[in-house]
């Protein structure tokens, strides 16, 4: 037995796409066979059937309807499968047993362009990494919008920056060369837990000569000088490999990817993955969604393009004072001018996602409804330019200048596309009447054929004078003129006899046969001609892609500025002053998200003063729930907002340019990678100490709580000394801690100042005033917080008793547990004996050898700990 011709065709195609699921078009369904069918039926919960394939056993088979295929593909992509779409390239015809089929596209997690499978305000990036020696070339692209980036990263010490760049891209697919896995066994495993699986490509596509040639060929240039990346040899390898992969999977020219943008890290504030997470820039820690995040607050954009642009700005805060102030001026003008703001807002609400429509045009998947959406979007351009013509600031004037004149494209679409077209582009009903004369004639015959025949019949009766003449039709002869036997002698010479009947004669004429041909083929011809015309319109859009994309970028920037202006107006934000002197001065600052979430009580504002000299390091003490974490985060967020060109939630703010914001906030165990809370905490602290500079802003929310008290205090103390030292870092820092001993550093370390959160006590009740003031707290109020959390009264009373015993006990005489377990009331405080009698001489000798004048606080603490441990061992 042998395979059927169709199954042979299927297996030949499957041989070329072994590592993907092949969706094989059969009529109105996409079918899967053999192993693909088993996988798809399991993952998609489809009924598994079988099909005769010429072998003894039927081939396993399952399928999905073509009109709902995106839903099924999306489910497979979420499970990290890739899908090859095999289409019928010819129509089934009589006498031809097998239609032509081929794979037209391979859909992968990073190459989705369908709106139904994407979040319209989030980019869908695919990343390429080329690792060689101690450096890394990286390139990333969003196929759905045409964005294409390249950069190089120094990996001489570790892969931290690569991880952070990947985290920022939020890549859905990553391709790498072999050396990537060979360089570090830990690095790929670590980020695999956070990111999508990796795909290794053949090293030849990363080879510089091949990659450079691929890029030059694509952009139709001799070299890459125009893109300012000719010296990025590793970056070019990554970008060329990515373009090759996209060409192989997308199977089109990718003409919408018409530029390569060099990402320059020095132009943007560095935000690592911990900072993005801890500051809840794009996702709240509790909800694990957009609500409660900073982007949730800021995003009042009217267009999908603006939403994506605003996310990009938030991910890449600016480092240029001039560029920041350009944005601030634009936000200020929009915020202060109500009519301008509302006028632009109304216009932008009519704009569709031009970027992704352009991509569908490049892919050949654009439909008539996309064209109508494009036409409506372009129709607002003259009014938008008119609104912007009155603006004074440079940024808005620049946007106005970059809005291309697209009257020709708008006119084309307006004249050609019907107002209510069908979804499909091969079903007819797309092109307007009057756009094409030939199509109008075909549609006239297709829609009015019967009436035209009756008109011809009437003319013939009148010309011949034969009252019984009639025009008929049958499937054998088509249209004919029939005359009765008695009137046959009156038939004109131009009539051609076709058939003799018992009661009459049937004739044809050249005019009748021409009409027949037009009527019978009019509908099919009109549908085919409409598709040809639509394809020509699509090609005109493709030719205009650069102009359309430039306009889309300008609209996105305007929309982002408008969103920031609306937030500033709605929530009474202030325009920050930007400086480069190291001063950070915030008057009555507020946490932008928390103040919006608080419905029942007003947010308590707090001021902040930091500089490069005497006020570099804030040690903040106070009880849990008092607002320390919120306060520190609001300082970081206000600083970040100023760097993206946004107004800030404060009465006023003077913000110095910061190169990086670091945050060390509470962590949880990562058991899968064998990392404890303390290990994660120390890893984050190590990252800060290795990478922070004097221009950085550091947020430390507790250090050392994951280990013993003495170890934790020792580490916190040493970290404070290291950061506060100008010789080491000298960065502006906010450090919230429960180690009240750190307050001793004020006056001993230059730049360190104590602050605390104020509280009011009424008996056992504590009221948090949430106001940050100078000074240090002397109590933690942990039991008061436990009471607010709802611990049973009996547990709270016992806690207070234990606390009293610990505060008043003589630790030299009993262990901590012995003091807790002692009967009766807590012992009264006595003078603590530092020495154990049997070992007094040795301890006295150690003390005599100490030079008090040179002893540092950290050394004194270690000495005290050593003496205590010696006394305990000898007891």
Image: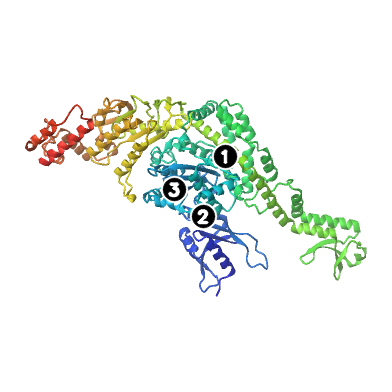
Task: Looking at the picture, tell me which residue is in the foreground, 336 or 701.
Answer: 701
Instruction: Work out how far the residue at label 2 is from the one at label 1, CA to CA, in angstroms.
Output: 39 Å
Identify the residue at horizontal 81%, vertical 57% (top origin).
453
Instruction: Work out how far the residue at label 3 is from the one at label 1, CA to CA, in angstroms.
Output: 25 Å
Answer whether labels 3 and 2 touch (C-beta < 8 Å). no
Task: Looking at the picture, tell me which residue is in the foreground, 504 or 87.
Answer: 87
Label 1, secondary structure: give it. Answer: helix
Identify the residue at horizontal 40%, vertical 52% (top origin).
182
Identify the residue at horizontal 44%, vertical 40% (top origin).
282
Q: Which mark is residue 226?
A: 1
Task: Looking at the picture, tell me which residue is in the foreground, 549 or 51.
Answer: 549
Label 2, secondary structure: give it. Answer: helix
Expressed as whole percent of the image width and height from the top left, the position of residue 536 reads 68, 48
Expressed as whole percent of the image width and height from the top left, the position of residue 520 reads 75, 59
Q: Hey, which quadrant is residue 616 in on the image?
A: top left
Badge 3 is on which residue?
132
Q: Residues within 10 Å of mark 2 (few under 14, many from 20)?
A: many
Q: Which mark is residue 73?
A: 2
Q: Which is nearer the N-term, disc 3 or disc 1?
A: 3
């Amino acid at each position: 037995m042998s395979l059927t011709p169709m199954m042979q065709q299927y297996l030949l195609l499957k041989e070329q796409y072994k590592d993907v699921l092949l969706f094989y078009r059969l009529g109105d369904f996409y079918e899967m066979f053999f192993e693909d069918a088993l996988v798809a039926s399991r993952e998609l919960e489809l009924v598994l059937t079988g099909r005769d394939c010429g072998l003894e056993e039927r081939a396993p088979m399952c399928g999905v309807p073509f009109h709902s295929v995106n839903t099924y593909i999306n489910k497979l992509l979420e499970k990290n499968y890739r899908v090859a779409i095999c289409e019928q390239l010819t129509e089934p015809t009589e006498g031809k047993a097998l239609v032509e089929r081929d794979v037209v596209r391979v859909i992968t997690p990073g190459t989705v362009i369908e709106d139904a499978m994407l979040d319209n305000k989030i980019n869908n990036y695919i990343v390429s990494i080329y690792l060689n020696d101690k450096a890394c070339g990286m390139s990333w692209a969003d196929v759905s919008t045409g964005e294409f980036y390249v950069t190089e990263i120094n990996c001489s010490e570790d892969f931290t920056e690569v991880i952070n760049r990947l985290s920022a891209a939020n890549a859905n697919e990553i391709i790498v060369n072999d050396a990537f896995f060979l360089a570090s066994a830990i690095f790929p495993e670590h980020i695999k837990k956070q990111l999508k699986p990796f795909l290794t490509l053949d090293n030849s596509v990363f080879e510089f000569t091949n990659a450079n040639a691929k890029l030059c060929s694509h952009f139709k240039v001799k070299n890459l000088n125009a893109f300012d990346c000719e010296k990025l040899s590793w970056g070019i390898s990554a970008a060329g490999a990515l373009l090759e992969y996209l060409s192989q999977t997308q199977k089109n020219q990718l003409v919408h990817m018409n530029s390569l943008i060099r990402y320059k890290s020095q132009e943007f504030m560095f935000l690592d993955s911990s900072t993005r997470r801890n500051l809840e820039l794009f996702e709240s820690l509790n909800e694990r969604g957009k609500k409660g995040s900073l982007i949730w607050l800021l995003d009042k954009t009217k267009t999908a393009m603006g939403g994506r642009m605003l996310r990009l700005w938030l991910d890449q805060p600016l480092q240029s004072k001039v560029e920041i102030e350009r944005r601030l001026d634009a936000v200020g003008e929009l915020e202060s001018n109500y009519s301008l703001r509302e006028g632009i807002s109304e216009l932008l609400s009519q704009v569709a996602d031009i970027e992704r429509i352009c991509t569908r045009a490049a892919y050949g998947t654009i439909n008539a409804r996309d064209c109508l959406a494009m036409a409506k979007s372009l129709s607002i351009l003259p009014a938008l330019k008119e609104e912007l013509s009155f603006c004074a600031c440079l940024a808005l004037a620049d946007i106005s200048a970059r809005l291309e004149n697209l009257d020709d494209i708008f006119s084309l679409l307006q004249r050609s596309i019907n107002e209510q077209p069908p979804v499909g582009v091969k079903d007819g009903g797309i092109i307007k009447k009057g756009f094409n004369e030939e199509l109008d004639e075909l549609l006239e015959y297709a829609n009015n054929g019967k009436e035209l025949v009756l008109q011809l019949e009437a003319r013939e009766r009148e010309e011949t004078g034969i009252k019984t003449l009639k025009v008929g039709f049958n499937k054998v002869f088509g249209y004919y003129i029939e005359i009765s036997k008695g009137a046959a002698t009156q038939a004109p010479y131009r009539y051609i006899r076709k058939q003799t009947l018992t009661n009459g004669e049937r004739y044809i004429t050249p005019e009748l046969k021409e009409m027949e041909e037009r009527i019978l083929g009019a509908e099919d011809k009109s549908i085919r001609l409409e598709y040809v015309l639509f394809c020509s319109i699509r090609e005109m859009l493709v030719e205009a892609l650069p102009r359309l994309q430039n306009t889309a970028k300008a609209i996105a920037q305007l929309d982002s500025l408008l969103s920031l202006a609306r937030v500033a107006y709605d929530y009474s934000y202030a325009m920050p002053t930007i400086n480069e002197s190291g001063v950070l001065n915030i008057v009555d600052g507020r946490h932008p998200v928390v103040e919006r979430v608080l419905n029942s009580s007003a947010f308590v504002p707090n001021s902040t003063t930091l500089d490069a000299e005497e006020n570099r390091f804030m040690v903040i003490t106070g009880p849990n729930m008092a607002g320390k974490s919120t306060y520190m985060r609001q300082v970081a967020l206000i600083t970040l907002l100023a760097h993206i060109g946004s107004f800030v939630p404060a009465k006023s703010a003077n913000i110095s340019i910061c190169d990086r914001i670091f945050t060390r906030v509470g962590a949880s165990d990562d058991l899968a990678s064998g990392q404890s809370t303390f290990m994660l905490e120390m890893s984050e602290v190590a990252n800060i100490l290795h990478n922070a500079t004097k221009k950085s802003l550091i947020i430390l929310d507790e250090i050392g709580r994951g280990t013993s008290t003495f170890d934790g205090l020792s580490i916190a103390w040493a970290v404070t000394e290291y950061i506060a030292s100008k010789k080491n870092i000298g960065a502006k820092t906010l450090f919230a801690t429960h180690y009240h001993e750190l307050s001793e550093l004020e006056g001993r370390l230059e730049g360190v100042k104590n602050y605390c959160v104020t509280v009011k006590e009424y008996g056992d009740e504590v009221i948090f005033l949430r106001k940050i003031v100078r000074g240090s707290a002397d109590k933690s109020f942990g039991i008061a917080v436990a009471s607010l959390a709802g611990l049973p009264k009996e547990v709270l009373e016992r806690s207070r008793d234990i606390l009293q015993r610990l505060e008043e006990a003589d630790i030299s005489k009993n262990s901590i547990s012995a003091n807790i377990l002692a009967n009766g009331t807590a012992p009264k405080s006595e003078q603590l004996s530092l020495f154990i009698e049997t070992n007094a001489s040795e301890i006295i000798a150690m003390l005599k050898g100490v030079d008090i004048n040179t002893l540092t606080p950290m050394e004194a603490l270690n000495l005290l700990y050593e003496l205590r441990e010696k006394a305990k061992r000898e007891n």
